[in-house]
Image (cartoon, helix red, strand yellow):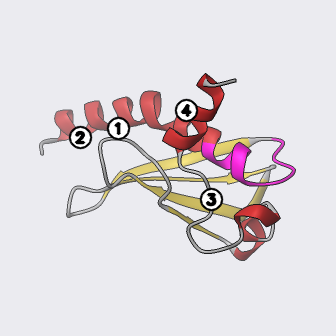
């Protein structure tokens, strides 16, 4: 991937995936006042990662990996952000994916 292709991919990720990541965080975590995105990288294997933090607290950071066509659930997070996870989603794999959230919104 040349520099121009990489820049175009990063712009597309910012436009399409950041809203999905924010939706996921706001739905699955308590007391989210703001979501800030700080960096988008594409690792050597071609997997995009979007980094950021919540509530103006850089210690409440996340790293969202986009392993499929769109971001769904792959979120690494600080312990501080993990403590904000809603109780009903604390079990491994219990957090709702973006597709599940969108389906729920559509059915309302």
Query: For the residue carrying disc 3, how many other residues have a C-alpha within 10 Å: few (<14), some (14-19), or many (20+)?
Result: many
Q: Secondary structure at mark 3?
A: loop
In the rendered view of the protein, which quadrant contains the N terminus? top left
Label 4 close to label 2 by CB (< 8 Å): no
Q: How far separated are the C-alphas under marks 3 and 2?
A: 31 Å
**Tag 1 residue:** 10
Q: Which residues are magenta?
A: 24-33
**Tag 3 residue:** 95
Residue 25 within the segment the image draws in magenta: yes
Q: How far separated are the C-alphas under marks 2 and 1?
A: 6 Å
Residue 72 within the segment the image draws in magenta: no
> Nearer the observer, disc 3 or disc 1?
3
Q: Which residue is depicted at the point 77% across and 63% down?
A: 88
Query: For the residue carrying disc 4, how many other residues have a C-alpha within 10 Å: few (<14), some (14-19), or many (20+)?
Result: few
Label 1 close to label 4 by CB (< 8 Å): no
Earlier in the chain: of badge 4 and badge 2, it is 2
Earlier in the chain: of badge 4 and badge 3, it is 3
Q: How far separated are the C-alphas under marks 1 and 4?
A: 27 Å
x and y, in percent, of residue 50 in the image: 47, 51
x and y, in percent, of residue 98 in the image: 53, 42
Q: Secondary structure at mark 4?
A: helix
**Tag 4 residue:** 103
- Does residue 84 appear to the left or right of 13 in the view shown? right
Label 2 close to label 1 by CB (< 8 Å): yes
Q: Is residue 85 visible?
A: no
Q: Nearer the viewer, residue 7 or 23?
A: 23
Task: Check the image and report above or below for 11 versus 67.
Answer: above
> Nearer the observer, disc 4 or disc 3?
4
Q: How far separated are the C-alphas under marks 4 and 2?
A: 31 Å
Q: How far separated are the C-alphas under marks 4 and 3?
A: 14 Å
> Nearer the observer, disc 1 or disc 4?
4
């Amino acid at each position: 991937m040349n520099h121009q292709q990489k820049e175009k991919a990063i712009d597309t990720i910012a436009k399409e995936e950041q809203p999905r990541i924010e939706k996921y965080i706001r739905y699955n975590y308590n007391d989210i006042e703001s979501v800030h995105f700080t960096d988008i990288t594409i690792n050597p294997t071609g997997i995009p990662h979007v980094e950021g933090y919540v509530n103006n607290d850089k210690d409440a950071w996340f790293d969202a990996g986009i392993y499929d066509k769109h971001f769904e659930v792959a979120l690494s997070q600080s312990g501080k952000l993990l403590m904000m996870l809603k109780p009903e989603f604390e079990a491994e794999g219990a957090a709702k994916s973006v597709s599940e959230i969108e389906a729920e919104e559509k059915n309302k």
